[in-house]
Image: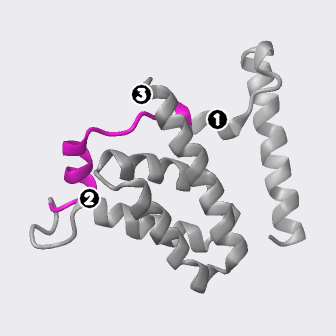
Amino acid sequence: MTDDLTKMFAAMMAQGQEMARAFAPAMEGVDVKGFEKLFPTMPPEMLEMWFGKTFNPDGLDARTRLLVTIAALTVQGALAEPQLRLTIRQALTAGATKRHIAEVIWQMSMFGGLPAMQKALEIAQSVFAEVEETKE
């Protein structure tokens, strides 16, 4: 990230913290990275409607489209963490296995580099752990 972009992002985060503090003082230390947990995963039928064969009956299914999305987000590195977390959760709901997701991420090491792959695997592992916790 460039220095200007970093400053702009920091200012946006500070402004978001101020807004949260104004709305509810108890939210002063809110972790905005946790917001993706507020968005539930879609049921498989809805995933198929939005990401699957609705617009192209002969095309990719939702699981495959979400795996392709995970690949693209992995190459972007740490910039796409919230989107990657949400997409991994959606892919699991659409029928992707942990192995499918890990394999896609590993494959992207050739395109995004080892640091991007490592970060994506860490994110995937934390999502897998969260999903396991909610099943119990």
Q: How is the image coloured?
A: one colour
* Residue type (three-letter) at the residue carrying disc 1: Gly
Residue 99: which disc?
none
Residue in the foreground of this view, choosing between 105 and 17: 105
Q: Secondary structure at mark 1?
A: helix
Secondary structure state at the residue bearing disc 2 = helix
Packing grade of label 2 (10 A; few <14, some 14-19, many >=20) is: many
In the rendered image, the vertical position of residue 31 relative to residue 77, given as above or below: above
Q: Which residue is mark 1?
A: 34
Q: Earlier in the sequence, mark 2 or mark 3?
A: 2
> Dot 3 corresponds to which residue?
135
Q: Earlier in the sequence, mark 3 or mark 1?
A: 1
What residue is shown at x 44% (from left), y 61% (from top)? 101
Tell me the amino acid under the disc marked 2.
Answer: Ala
CA separation in Å, label 2 and label 1? 25 Å
The kind of residue tagged 3 is Lys
Q: Residue at x 55, y 39 (%)?
A: 129
Asked whether the residues under the numbered discs 3 and 1 touch, taking CB atoms below 8 Å apart as contact, a structural biologist would say no
Q: Position of residue 121 (x, y in %)?
A: 60, 60
**Can you give x and y, in whole percent of width and height, for residue 49 in the image?**
19, 51
Span highlighted in magenta in the image? 37-53
- Spatial CA distance of label 3 from label 1 is 19 Å
Residue position marked by numbered label 2 in the rendering: 62
Q: Quadrant of the N terminus?
A: bottom right
Residue 23 is a magenta residue: no
Residue 112 occupies quadrant: bottom right
Q: Is residue 45 above or below residue 20?
A: below
Looking at this view, is 23 or 36 the one in front? 36
